[in-house]
Amino acid sequence: MNDQIGQLSATEAEAQLTPWAQRAAPIARQDYEARIEHARSLLHDSGADALLVTAGASLRYFCGVPWGASERLVALLITRDGEPIAICPAFEGATLAHVLTVAAVPRLWEEHENPYTLVAAAMAERGAHSLALDPAAPYFVFEGLRRALDGRAIVDASAIVDGCRARKSPAELALMQQACDMTLHVHRLAAGLMREGVTTTEIKYFIDRAHRRLGADNGSTFCIVQFGEATSHPHGVPGEQRLRENELVLIDTGCSVHGYNSDITRTYIYGKPSADAARIWELERAAQQAAFAAVRPGISGEAVDAAARTVLERGGLGPDYRLPGLPHRTGHGCGLAVHEAPYLVRGNAVALAPGNCCSNEPMIVVPEKFGVRLEDHFHVTDDGAAWFTPPSPAIDRPFA
């Protein structure tokens, strides 16, 4: 259709899938150690005596262990003093030793044993009477701890965990930049492959393969491909679609690099847009820019959300979550999880700070017709914000 949309053959696209040359360095051991010390300082401020971080993104953040949660307790206990204590099933102990990036005292439990009593015993040894629990811990972990701690306080560790993870270091920003650069390259190639009759399945398979070939951790972390009316559903509809001329294309995808995520959406026209689609696309672009312009240290997430909604309401959309309009928050934090604090949403009065990383995606939905979502990420700087990726300039030119 032009030099950005529909101009590539499959062979030409495949030829541009070579391992990424400018690779960011992984998180260093001293960075993990500094994170634990930061958690200790926040733990002291919270009044709790110990912090328990369970398997998932936060365990990876504090000690490099990339394991997901399961029914077996894997956790790191951080007390005010002494080495952290790693709690793990005994049969995984040797593997744990290979993936731990910090010095930690191992406490291993056999399959018939209760791991929560290990936590209670370790706390007693360190003189810890109250526990701050990872906010992502499953309820059964909370219940097991409640019984084992026998009345000792268990409090929410969100302020500690988010207080550490929400402000990215230069090393984290570099990993996120690489992930974003890789995903934007994949977006460019996918746009080039658009042709009448191509299916959403074909494009999804290409995007996953492309992320893998470039060197992402595990291909696409997620991938949404929608054509035409399906673009009016923020997270897609079941089934396969075939592209027709003059339809909108919406692709939302991302990858991870050493666990750090990208999440980018492009919406563009294959052919010629209707006057209504062109108007809505420009409103979306203006709302995204208004949200970005509002960002600075000290401003709240809800104020950024309000800046985008003001533009949409002036354009005759909404108000609030009414359709046609914006049915969800303007953005979310991103890092080791695709969605994490801080959130750009009404009710979040927490001030943004340098190092915060957020998506900016004030999607417009026109029910039963189409939707437009432009999503790029920014990080908060000392005096404003900086994009990870340049926003789309036009409905028929998705890339700057």
Image: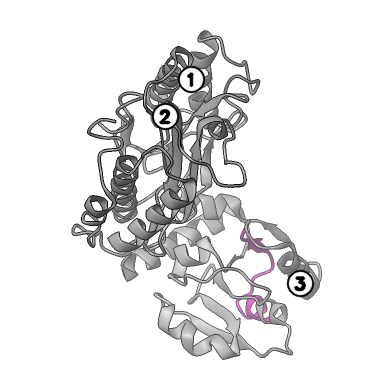
Residue 72: x %, y % from top left: 66, 77
Query: In the rendered view, how is the structure colored?
Result: one colour
Percent x, y for residue 267? 42, 32
Q: Which residues are magenta?
A: 121-134
Q: Amino acid at mark 1?
A: Ala
Is residue 375 positioned above or below 95 on the image? above
Q: Which mark is residue 229?
A: none
Q: Position of residue 181 (x, y in %)?
A: 28, 47
Report the residue marked by disc 3: 144
Disc 2 versus disc 1: distance between alpha carbons? 34 Å
Which residue occupies 42% across, 29% down?
Answer: 245
Quick check: 381 left or right of 82?
A: left
Mark 1 lies on a secondary structure that is: helix
Mark 2 or 3: in front is: 2
Mark 2 residue element: loop
Furthest toward the front, the residue is: 197
Q: Which circle, 2 or 1, is nearer the viewer?
A: 2
Q: Which mark is residue 307?
A: 1
Q: Is residue 161 above or below residue 108?
A: above
The residue that label 2 is drawn on is: 245
Mark 1 neighbour class, 10 Å CA radius: few under 14, some 14 to 19, many 20 or more:
many
Q: In the image, is residue 291 part of the stretch drawn in magenta?
A: no
Residue 307's place in the image compared with 53, above or below, is above
* Drawn side of residue 206 relative to residue 62, left or right: left
| Identity of the residue drawn at 58% across and 33% down | 348
> Going by the image, does 322 lie left or right of 76?
right
Q: Is label 1 in contact with label 3 (beta carbons under 8 Å)?
A: no
Q: Nearer the viewer, mark 1 or mark 3?
A: 1
